[in-house]
Image (spheres, rainbow, N blue to C red):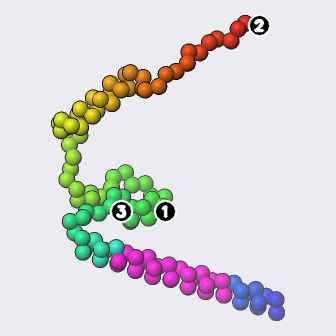
Amino acid sequence: MAEQTSEQAVQARNKATEEQKEHAKKVIAEQKQAREQRMADQPDEGKPTPTQEENDMAAMGVHIPEHEPDGSPVQDPFAPQDKATHERGKQKQVEGQRGGQYQTRAQQPKPAE
């Protein structure tokens, strides 16, 4: 009689696990459909990088060396910068050479005992 109850418990646990699995699949499918609908409503917005699928794959341990393009224009890292950005970069460089806006104390060596 004890075996029957343990078998019934295993069957009940398996049924609950399957129901939970089916519910999770349903929720994920609904979220995906809602996400796709939002993307269809705002096609010029681009898409996030990494995408949700890439995040899901990464969570499962899959290495993704290159992400899908997000729709934004390709930026040339060697393109000349505008003058304002260039001047801000120069100013930060000069501030870094001055050592900042604070004074430091000179460190004295410990006296020999």
For the residues labelled 3 and 1, the Cα–Cα distance comes to 14 Å
Q: Nearer the viewer, mark 3 or mark 2?
A: 2
**Residue under numbered circle 2:** 113
Residue depicted at x 45% and y 79%: 27
Nearer to us in this view, 21 or 112: 112
Which amino acid is tagged 2?
A: Glu
Residue depicted at x 32% and y 61%: 48
For the residues labelled 3 and 2, the Cα–Cα distance comes to 64 Å
Q: Earlier in the sequence, mark 3 or mark 2?
A: 3
Is 45 placed above or below 103 here?
below
Q: Is residue 3 left or right of residue 78?
A: right
**Residue under numbered circle 3:** 51
Q: Earlier in the sequence, mark 3 or mark 1?
A: 3
Nearer to us in this view, 80 or 87: 87
Nearer to us in this view, 113 or 24: 113
Find out whether the residues at labels 3 and 2 contact each other: C-beta distance under 8 Å. no
| Residue positioned most to the top | 112
Q: Is residue 11 left or right of residue 72?
A: right
Q: Earlier in the sequence, mark 1 or mark 2?
A: 1
Q: Nearer the viewer, mark 1 or mark 2?
A: 2
**Residue under numbered circle 1:** 60
Provide residue 23's location: percent of width, then percent of height: 50, 83
Q: Quadrant of residue 64?
A: bottom left
Q: Which residues are magenta?
A: 11-34
Q: Is residue 99 left or right of residue 49?
A: right
Q: Residues within 10 Å of mark 1 (few under 14, many from 20)?
A: few
